[in-house]
Amino acid sequence: MTDTPLRVVVLGYGYAAKTFHIPLIRATPGLELAAICSRHPEKIRADAPDVTATADAGEAMRLGDLVVVATPNETHGRLAADAIGAGRHVVVDKPLTVTLDEARAVSALAQARGRLVFTFHNRRWDSDFLAARALVGSGLLGGVTLYESHFDRFRPAVRDRWREKPGPGSGLWRDLGPHLVDQALQLFGLPERVTGHLARQRPGSAVDDWAHAVLDYGPMRALLHADLLVPGRPLRLVIHGFAGEWRKDGLDVQERQLIAGIPVDDAQFGVDPVRATWTDASGERVEMDVPRGEYRQFYLRVRDAIAGRGPNPVPPAQALAVVAVVQAVLESSAEGRTRDVPLTTAERSDFEHSRQPL
């Protein structure tokens, strides 16, 4: 560690910035929250009087070493390019961009300018996914035959927010699909093809609020599902193998804890009270612990990558692959047919070389 912290500027002051980025930045040694940019700087001054508040993105970028883009999805590509052009490293809230062409342009610009781009795929550090990653890597399943991943919630009323209004970056699949896709790609790599089904189920919904995608891995399938009409403690993950089934119910607790203001260094932060279950071939069922979730790992690794002490935790090749699969699912649903993942041979190779072994 150096004595001089990295100055961080956050663009946007909505849900993502306030719930995730700002608390995690403040909790990461070596990072200093220098400025926040919003159309309503008076709200920032009231909530965070220790940082500079501005409505001018260009002015904000000049105040930092690292720019965090936590704005609506359709602005990600433009603001990331602006920050790179200003000579800054960039964190972009998922997805990296709305379109694959934009993702390619941002990645190419960062490489040309020698800047690092990080995509905030924080759910790589969910407790349930950390458990699933260890399980798949252990060989206990005897080979995976089915992977089913859910982000289900109960929100029957349509809310007044950009994610639920018509636009190029809105809808449930654009919101939760990147998480579901990123986790599947980390475990199994790129699928051979994808099939998607999106729907509007709630009265008054103007965008998709139900999503189901099937990723084809030859004899194995990955089912990805997001739903806003599931009460109670919903299924989170189930993995079938020749040796048995592993199941985890309930969503990771870190988002709720951050909303509640629980600091990340609290002894209970990230501790999931719901255990997983393992059922072997004989039908015997046992409970299994899951590791503690730790979203702060993302910013710790961003800090170290900028300092040259570690790799990019989410390399552009991986973020670009997520955008490609998300886009293919959207096109599949719209066209009513299975789609290939629209990546070049070079992009596929870059993705595979960037993956860490399980």
Image (spheres, grey):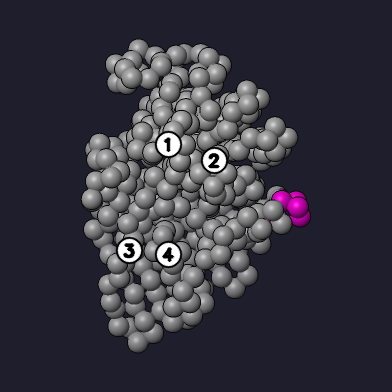
Decide: is 228 above or below 261.
Answer: below
Q: Amino acid at mark 1?
A: Gly
CA–CA distance in space, label 3 to label 2: 32 Å
| Labelled disc at residue 307 | 2
Question: Along the line of sight, which residue is nearer the eye, 284 or 355?
Answer: 355
343 displayed left or right of 83: right
310 displayed left or right of 135: right
Image quadrant assignment for residue 167: top right
Give yes or no for contact between labels 1 and 2 (Cβ–Cβ under 8 Å). Answer: yes
CA–CA distance in space, label 1 to label 2: 10 Å
Decide: is 286 above or below 71.
Answer: below
What predominant SS class does the magenta segment belong to? helix
* Extreme-front residue of the structure: 3
Q: Find numbered disc 4 in the image and state the secondary structure of the residue it sits on.
A: helix
Disc 3 marks which residue?
Answer: 290
State which region is magenta.
344-348
Q: Earlier in the sequence, mark 1 or mark 3?
A: 1
Q: Is residue 220 visible?
A: yes
Q: Nearer the viewer, mark 4 or mark 2?
A: 2
Q: Earlier in the sequence, mark 1 or mark 2?
A: 1
Residue placed at 27% from the left, 40% from the top?
A: 263
Q: Earlier in the sequence, mark 1 or mark 4?
A: 1
Q: Residues within 10 Å of mark 2 (few under 14, many from 20)?
A: few
CA–CA distance in space, label 1 to label 3: 29 Å
Residue placed at 50% from the left, 19% from the top?
A: 63
CA–CA distance in space, label 4 to label 3: 9 Å
| Labelled disc at residue 132 | 4
Disc 1 marks which residue?
Answer: 30
Give yes or no for contact between labels 4 and 2 (Cβ–Cβ under 8 Å). Answer: no
